[in-house]
């Protein structure tokens, strides 16, 4: 049998995301050789599923991160770089944005540009308003929304369409800064704090859901769709328990977004499935590592393997219909409830990655003591 030529991926992790720690394992299982650039206190720095690791000094600046990337490109020749978090995503965007300055080597610019969507679409992943406008143009349902500069403007919006409404920062992650307001009193108690713009949106009563996939040159290669059963904190927080579903609108929306932005890599869209009608309403987009990618193989389709097959010119993997449909994410679900009734559905506990497992277990125990 002929040897399979290795395809190498660089994971850039500049924050300590739980999902980042398990991304190298999913990539390795998918057939990639993996390198990581990260800070020493990040969980990903502990994983054994990397072939090369560059641990940054705690005080490393942007120039040092770029130097480490250039060194890996020169000596290891990765095919792609994947952002593990929002800070890494913004850093890669900036590399492309300063291309004309001529201060960065062409090899770095080329790798980053080949790993990202069309530069004209960068704002889709960092500004919820831009993403909503794009999906509306593509023909998908988006809850009515309006940019605001004050709570009074949000009150005027609520007077027009009725309660509940939801306040959102244009950026943010995992529900950060989001406030669901069921009445005028809730709205008056809300605050528009921090940098960046805000908007108010009609709140859809229903079940939150996500479509997470992987794409190459604008073509969706594979996806896992799921509804969020448990989140932490309630309503606006991280997914803790998820059930795999099928939804034609969500799949079509993911494919349409990938095509419109000429997306490369991980893409995840948040939706709300309206209780009364079952209609899917688009909420937001993420273009970095998300929690479901790591254990996607446990759910019947390793999304990283889909990308590896496309880059290698191999047949796309076929989803396993017999795979589990319910997953409790580790450690997120045990952060939410150390005595979770979903323990038997903890499919992704990293017992195969001892240092990561030990660190996550310490976090669970610490939160349990606080509770």
Image (cartoon, grey):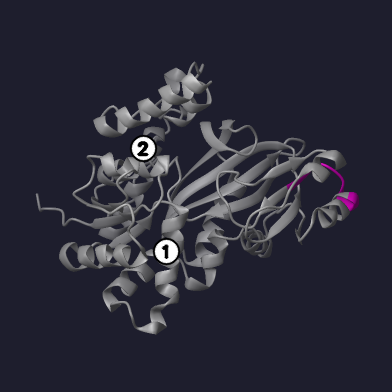
Q: Which mark is residue 203?
A: none
- Expressed as whole percent of the image width and height from the top left, the position of residue 278 reads 70, 39
Compare marks 2 and 1 and give the one earlier in the sequence: 1
Residue found 58% across the figure and 38% down from its top:
237
180 and 278: which is toward the camera? 180
| Disc 2 to disc 1: CB gap under 8 Å | no
* Position of residue 290 in the picture relative to residue 135 (left or right): left
* Position of residue 35 in the picture relative to residue 291 (left or right): left
Q: Quadrant of residue 358?
A: top left
Q: CA distance from mark 2 to mark 1?
A: 29 Å
Residue found 10% across the figure and 53% down from its top:
2
Q: Quadrant of residue 292?
A: top left
Report the span colored magenta: 159-166
Label 1: which residue? 91
* Residue 6 in view (yes/no): yes
Where disc 1 sits, the SS reads helix
- Label 1 CA crowd tier, 10 Å (few <14, some 14–19, many 20+): some
């Amino acid at each position: 049998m002929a040897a399979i030529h290795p395809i190498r991926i660089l994971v850039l992790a500049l924050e300590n995301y739980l999902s980042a720690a398990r991304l190298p394992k999913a990539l390795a299982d998918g057939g990639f050789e993996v390198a990581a650039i990260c800070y020493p206190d990040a969980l990903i720095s502990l994983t054994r599923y990397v072939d090369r690791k560059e641990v940054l000094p705690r005080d490393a600046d942007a120039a040092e991160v770029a130097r480490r990337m250039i060194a890996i490109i020169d000596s290891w020749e990765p095919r792609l770089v994947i952002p593990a978090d929002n800070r890494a995503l913004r850093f890669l965007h900036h590399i492309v944005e300063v291309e004309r300055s001529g201060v960065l080597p062409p090899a770095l610019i080329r790798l980053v540009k080949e790993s990202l969507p069309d530069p004209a679409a960068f704002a889709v992943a960092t500004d919820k308003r831009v993403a909503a406008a794009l999906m509306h143009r593509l023909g998908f349902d988006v809850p009515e929304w309006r940019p605001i500069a004050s709570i009074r403007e949000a009150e005027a919006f609520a007077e027009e369409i009725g309660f509940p409404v939801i306040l959102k920062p244009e950026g943010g992650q995992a529900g950060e800064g989001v406030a669901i307001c069921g009445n005028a009193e809730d709205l008056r108690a809300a605050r528009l704090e921090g940098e960046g713009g805000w908007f108010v949106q009609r709140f859809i009563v229903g079940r939150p859901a996500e479509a997470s996939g992987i794409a190459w040159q604008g073509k969706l290669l594979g996806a896992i769709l799921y509804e969020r059963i448990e989140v932490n904190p309630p309503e606006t927080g991280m997914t803790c328990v998820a059930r795999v579903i099928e939804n034609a609108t969500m799949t079509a929306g993911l494919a349409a977004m990938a095509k419109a932005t000429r997306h490369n890599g991980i893409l995840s869209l948040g939706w709300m499935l309206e209780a009364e009608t079952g209609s899917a309403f688009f909420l937001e987009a993420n273009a970095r590592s998300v929690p479901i990618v790591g254990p996607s193989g446990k759910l019947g389709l390793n999304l990283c393997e889909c990308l590896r097959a496309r880059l290698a010119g191999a047949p796309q993997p076929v989803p396993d219909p017999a795979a589990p449909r319910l997953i409790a994410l580790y450690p997120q679900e045990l952060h939410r409830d150390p005595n979770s009734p979903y323990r038997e559905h903890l499919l992704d506990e990293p017992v195969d990655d001892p240092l990561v497992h030990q660190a996550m277990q310490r976090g669970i125990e610490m939160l349990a003591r606080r509770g």
